Amino acid sequence: MSDTTVASPVRRVVARIVDLRKDYVLGKNVVHALRGVSLEFRQGDFVAIMGASGSGKSTLLNLLGCLDKPTSGRYILAGQDVSQLDDYALSKIRSRYLGFIFQSYNLIPQLSVVENIQIPLQYQGDDSPAALQRCVRLAKLVGLGDRLDHRPTELSGGQQQRVAIARSLVNNPHVILADEPTGNLDSATGEEIMGLLDALNRAGRTIIMVTHEADIAAHAHRVVRLRDGRIEHDGTP
C-alpha cells in the first residue's frame, strides 16, 4: 500500500512589521501612537489585537490595512515593502492583497447584496460575467443565496455583516482585516458571525481582528495586547 500521508505545508509569512512607529502632531503636542512595534503574521493565522482606548490598536490596523503610512519602520506585505508608498500605490496594494470587515459594515445603500460584494472587483476594472458569478457564489457561501437582490436596508445587522464578509473575500486577499466585526451586533448574532470567521480561518484564511471583547478574542489563536503604543502581550488568548 502506498503512503498517502501529505506533510503539512510550511505556513509562509504574509505580513511583517519591523519597529513600526506612528506619531501624530496635535497642535504643539506629539502623540506617539505606536512606539516600535514588530510583529509577524503567517498564512492561516487568526490574531486578535486588544488594548484599552488609546493603546494604538486602531492605528496598527490602519497601518496594516495600508490606510495610513508609518512615521518610521518597515511593513512588508506579500514580500513587498509598502511602508512609504504613495496613496495611489497603496490603493493598488489594498485592492490586491487585503480584505476589510468594518464594525459599521460600510455597505452602499443603493446597491444590492451582489453589487456590494462586487465593489472591490469594480475598482480593479473587472466587471466580467465570471466576476459576477464569483460574487453570487460568495453570497451563497455566507448564507445569503436568497437575498441576492436585497438592499442593505432590507437586511438585518447580521446579514449586512455577512455581505461585508463576502465582500472582503471577493479579491481572494492574503489577509482579512476585521475592525470590531461584532461591535454592532447582539451576542447571538455576534457568535454566528464569529462562527463564519472561524470557518474561513479553518479553510486557510489569515484574519487579523481588533476587538475589546474577551469572548470574541477567544476565537483567535493568538492575542496581541497593546499598551501605550507598545506590545504588552503576544501569545495565546
Image (cartoon, rainbow, N blue to C red):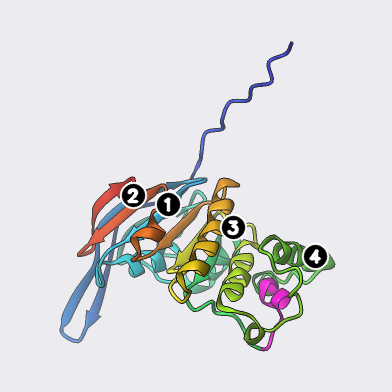
Q: Which residues are magenta?
A: 110-118
The residue that label 1 is drawn on is 220
The residue that label 2 is drawn on is 237
Which one is closest to the eye, mark 4 or mark 2?
2
Mark 3 or mark 4, which is nearer the start of the sequence?
Answer: 4
**Does residue 221 sit above or below 147 in this rendering?**
above
Residue under the image location 69 percent in, 84 percent down: 151
Pick the residue in front: 75 or 145.
145
* Separation of marks 1 and 3 at Cα, in angstroms: 19 Å
In the rendered structure, does residue 154 fall within the stretch colored magenta?
no
* Separation of marks 1 and 2 at Cα, in angstroms: 7 Å
Question: Given the current orientation, which residue lies at the most extreme left position?
Answer: 28
Amino acid type, residue under disc 2 in the picture:
Pro
Secondary structure at numbered mark 2: loop
Secondary structure at numbered mark 4: helix
Which of the numbered marks, if any, corresponds to residue 133?
4
Residue under the image location 53 percent in, 53 percent down: 198
Evaluate if marks 1 and 2 touch, with contact meaning CB atoms under 8 Å apart: yes
Which one is closest to the eye, mark 1 or mark 3?
1
